[in-house]
Amino acid sequence: MVILSDKWEVNKISLNSRLLIGTGRFETLEKTKLSIQAGNPSLVTVAIRRLETQKNEKENGSLLSAINWKQIWMLPNTAGSKTPDEAIRLGFLGKEIAKSLGQDNNRFLKLEVIADEKYLMPDPLGTIKAADYLIKKGFKIFPYINTDPILASHLEELGCATLMPLGSAIGSNQGLKNLENIKIIIEQSKIPVIIDAGIGKPSDASKAMEIGADAVLINTAIASAERPELMAEAMKYAVIGGRLSYLSNPQAISIKKGTLSSPKKGVLF
């Protein structure tokens, strides 16, 4: 099967699955565990602020101990940061958490700087400022950004490890709302492009992969499903299907006329 050898890399680290799963919106720890088992992601995001602010140390430990970090990379997340300084502080804390889990060489960081409390749109200037500082400190930055190809180019030039343009607003399940700009970002980027936020259905995940995205990050669509483990599995196969479709190099859509699927040459009558 082609997809079995279709690994991808971030910062020279080889990853098997092109699905990433977030842990922020699950109702229970058990649903989180089942969904991760079913989806088999390569990376799992954990909000650093969530861990930092939990008063119950037992609960804090349970989220981290529920996942087999020998098989899955942790992607610390600066969600909740309104300023670059907040994101930077959480980034260093996230590195220490990853180290405590045995991932000593993990420098991954999903960078979110969001001052907009209504629409939750990422702050481009704050993201650039935080990314510039953190990259110089050795972090491998996964920046969450709007679908702005120019911003994406600047962040790539800064040295980000990936780009994470949003499909649509966080938690909206609206799918890929700015498809043309996403395509431009994918086309011009030389680093992995991971579609993040807004993917609401397996068909959205498949579409993201069909247009050439390297991976997708999904949380709300899985966590809000009545049976999240089934949605996680559906997303896993949607990602595989979309990636296989992309690799097959499908024929361009014809808008002028139909084309016979069976040739006329060689017919008996």
Image (cartoon, rainbow, N blue to C red):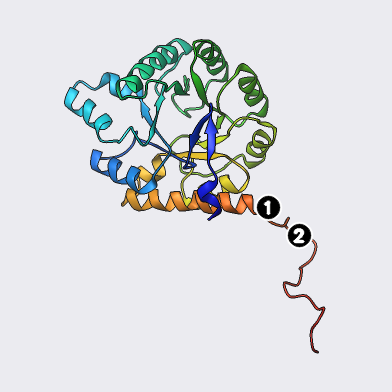
**Horizontal relation, residue 112 to residue 208: left or right:** left
**Horizontal relation, residue 223 to residue 131: left or right:** left
**Horizontal relation, residue 226 to residue 138: left or right:** left
The residue indicated by pointer 2 is 254
Q: Which mark is residue 249?
A: 1
In front here: 261 or 179? 261
Where residue 241 appears, as percent x and y from the top left, is 53, 54
Q: Residue at x 34, y 42 (%)?
A: 36
The residues tagged by marks 1 and 2 sit, at their Cα atoms, a distance apart of 15 Å
Alpha-carbon neighbours of circle 2 within 10 Å: few (<14), some, or many (≥20)? few
Where residue 126 appears, as percent x and y from the top left, is 53, 15
**Horizontal relation, residue 151 to residue 8: left or right:** right
Residue 166 appearing in the image? no
Q: Nearer the viewer, mark 1 or mark 2?
A: 1
Question: Which mark is first along the chain, 2 or 1?
Answer: 1
> How many numbered markers are drawn?
2
Which amino acid type is shown beneath numbered disc 1? Asn
Q: Residue at x 54, y 38 (%)?
A: 8
Helix or strand or loop: what does disc 2 sit on? loop
Q: Residue at x 61, y 39 (%)?
A: 178
Q: Is residue 234 above or below residue 120?
A: below
Q: Do the numbered discs 1 and 2 sit on residues whose CB atoms are within 8 Å? A: no
Alpha-carbon neighbours of circle 1 within 10 Å: few (<14), some, or many (≥20)? few
Which amino acid type is shown beneath numbered disc 2? Ser
Where residue 205 appears, as percent x and y from the top left, is 51, 47
Helix or strand or loop: what does disc 1 sit on? loop
Where residue 155 appears, as percent x and y from the top left, is 61, 21
Q: Quadrant of residue 97?
A: top left
In the image, farthest residue toward the bottom: 269
Q: Residue at x 73, y 75 (%)?
A: 262
